[in-house]
Image (spheres, rainbow, N blue to C red):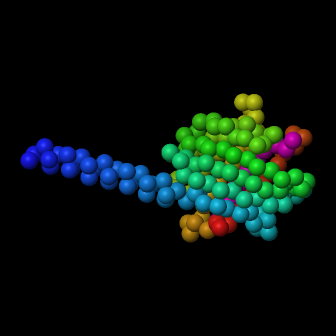
Amino acid sequence: MRTHSLVISAILITALVLALAVIALAADPHVGTWKLNLAKSKYSPASSAPKSATMTFTAQDNGVKCVSDGVESNGKAYHEEFAPKYDGKDYAYTGSSEVDTIAYTKIDANTVDWVTKKGGKIAGSGQSVVSRDGKTRTVTAKGKDAKGKDTTRTSVFEKQ
């Protein structure tokens, strides 16, 4: 009888741990589809503003996977992907000629600091913050463009 109780207890504990893990992953406010609101965003130089951008984040083990599609300022369509964990380590970033890795560091439930690199050198850095109501994601960033000129941006995304 005691063995039966231990087996049932182990099963219940395992189920509880799995349920909590699913809740924790689903609770990530960055997860979802985000569309750029150009009217609320600011780019310097202004000519660097994209024509459109949509980012879709899905939860992964201690991180996210992002697929980003849009149209650059020059009218060229782009498709980028990256899947960092929230551990500050570099992860592959594909689809960009300006960066090849990204590192995410979670500051709090709604805030992530990030650094992009090209060939091991820092190409840009910034912060992504999801509003408390979960409807807006604001990305502030600084870096260099393809010509080596400084850029800054505040991109405001709305949850779809």
- The x, y position of residue 102, in whole percent, is 67, 40
Q: Is residue 35 above or below residue 125?
A: below
**Residue 142 among magenta residues:** yes
Which residue is located at x 49 percent, y 59 percent? Answer: 27
Write down the region rendered in magenta: 136-146
Q: Residue furthest left?
A: 1
Q: Is residue 118 left or right of residue 148?
A: left
Q: Quadrant of the C terminus?
A: bottom right
Q: Is residue 99 left or right of residue 83?
A: right
Q: Is residue 142 visible?
A: yes
**Residue 143 among magenta residues:** yes
Which residue is located at x 72 percent, y 30 percent? Answer: 120
- Magenta stretch mostly in which secondary structure? strand
- The x, y position of residue 35, in whole percent, is 71, 63
14 or 122: which is nearer to us?
14
Q: Is residue 98 left or right of residue 28?
A: right
Q: Is residue 156 visible?
A: no
Q: Residue furthest top?
A: 120
Q: Is residue 55 above or below residue 2?
A: below
Which residue is located at x 67 percent, y 62 percent? Answer: 34
53 or 3: which is nearer to us?
3
Which residue is located at x 80 percent, y 69 percent? Answer: 39
- The x, y position of residue 26, in whole percent, is 49, 58
49 or 14: which is nearer to us?
14
